[in-house]
Image (cartoon, grey):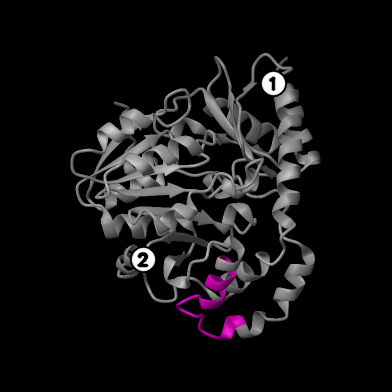
Amino acid sequence: MMKSKPDQDCLHGGVYSVNPGLVQLDFSSSVNPLGISRHLLRDLYGELNSLCTTYPDPLCRELKNSILDYLGIGLDPSWLLIGNGATELIHIFARTFLRRNVVISAPTFCEYELSTRRAGAAVKIVPLKNWKPDTEKILKESTNGCDAVFLCNPNNPTGILSTVSMQQIIENISSDTQIFIDECFIELVDDGDKKNTMIEMVSDYKNLVILRSMTKSFSLAGIRLGYCVCNPKLINRMLENKISWNVNGVAQKLGTMVLKDPSYLEKSRRLIQRERNFMMNELGKTTKFSPMPSDVNFFLIDVSNQSSVEVRNYLLSKRGILVRDCSTFTGMGLRHIRVAVKKHIENTTLIDAFKSMGP
């Protein structure tokens, strides 16, 4: 069984993971490269005074209704919990349900492991099999006193979509075990979320919790906004661990506004697919760097006999480019870095930097 990381090794990318003064281009944070439209920001500006001087709605009613309209799944607001980013919801879930042990398919997002340990539960790590969840082993490990299974689709940091595996686990796991599926990047996969999401299954499976992040899909990293969809009985239990006014008024309003543009994600996916193909094709021409398949707006690069830490440090110190060293992910070692897909001129700058390190 794969060895897990201690709490202090739950590290993230972003400009503040290093000396921010060194970062000119951040490829370590995998947010939507399209960014926020100027007209939307202008519309928000007119409401800032009221938003900043009024306590926010603690129930996030307007935002919940906007999310339900956007999802189109025929549920009511009692099926939603809004959080100050997806990470807050992961920790609320852990404090609510985790007591004994938890199964985590890894390498994956480290907050599942950190939240489990903070809740006082033991972690069982099930390594990926050919970069996908080992469905058989996950089901086996979740049979005896397992509080929950954490899954990520598409997975971070691999970028791989495993929809069939998610369905198999949901359909075959004990109803006493909570299934927490992180879909924070699913809206940015090539064919979108409609064919791949498990959200519609929450009506039939009372132990299923689906997590979404508006940080990734709508480029709201600094705003901190996420939500989960699950049975109201689970929501009511999690509400006991939620603080009052956990989502500020600006976040609620901006979240409501971005959901009104149906073309935004379509444009984003076309950009991501085109630019990811460009980046992979160019990196494939080198001998030192091997891009790995991905279904979303980031991908892994095998740095071969080099060290991921050394590659990260070189790009940062010599070019002002920050990439994600993956050695801090449980089970990854020093062989991989992760890069986000950005706009073409930025991606070209990254490719040039890689090529400067050798053919």
The stretch of residues the image draws in magenta is 51-67
Q: Give the crowd class for mark 1: few <14, some 14-19, many >=20 residues within 10 Å.
A: few
Of the pair 244 and 240, the residue shown nearer to us: 240
Please identify the quarter of the rendering in which residue 63 is found: bottom right
Q: Is residue 267 left or right of residue 12?
A: right
Nearest to N terminus: mark 1 or mark 2: 2
How would you rate the neighbour count of disc 2 (Cα within 10 Å): few for under 14, some for 14-19, many for 20 or more? some
Q: Is residue 154 magenta?
A: no
Mark seen at residue 357 = 1
| Marks 1, 2: nearer the viewer | 2
Q: Secondary structure at mark 1?
A: loop
Q: Nearer the viewer, residue 253 or 206?
A: 206
Tag 2 residue: 235
The CA distance from mark 1 to mark 2 is 50 Å
Q: Name the one closer to the observer, 72 or 184.
A: 72
Q: Which mark is residue 339?
A: none
In the displayed structure, 290 sits above or below 330; it is above
Q: Which of the 4 image quarters holds residue 292?
A: top right
Residue 97 x, y percent position in the rendering: 27, 56
Q: Residue at x 73, y 14 (%)?
A: 359
Q: Is residue 235 above or below residue 355?
A: below
Whether label 1 touches label 2, CB < 8 Å: no
- The N terminus is located in which quarter? top left
Q: Is residue 61 magenta?
A: yes
Percent x, y for residue 302?
Answer: 57, 22
Check disc 2 and give the amino acid type.
Answer: Ile
Q: Is residue 262 left or right of residue 245?
A: right
Find residue 103 and report its horizontal and vertical position in percent.
Answer: 30, 39
SS label for mark 2: helix
Amino acid under disc 1: Met
- Front position in the image: 192 or 88: 192
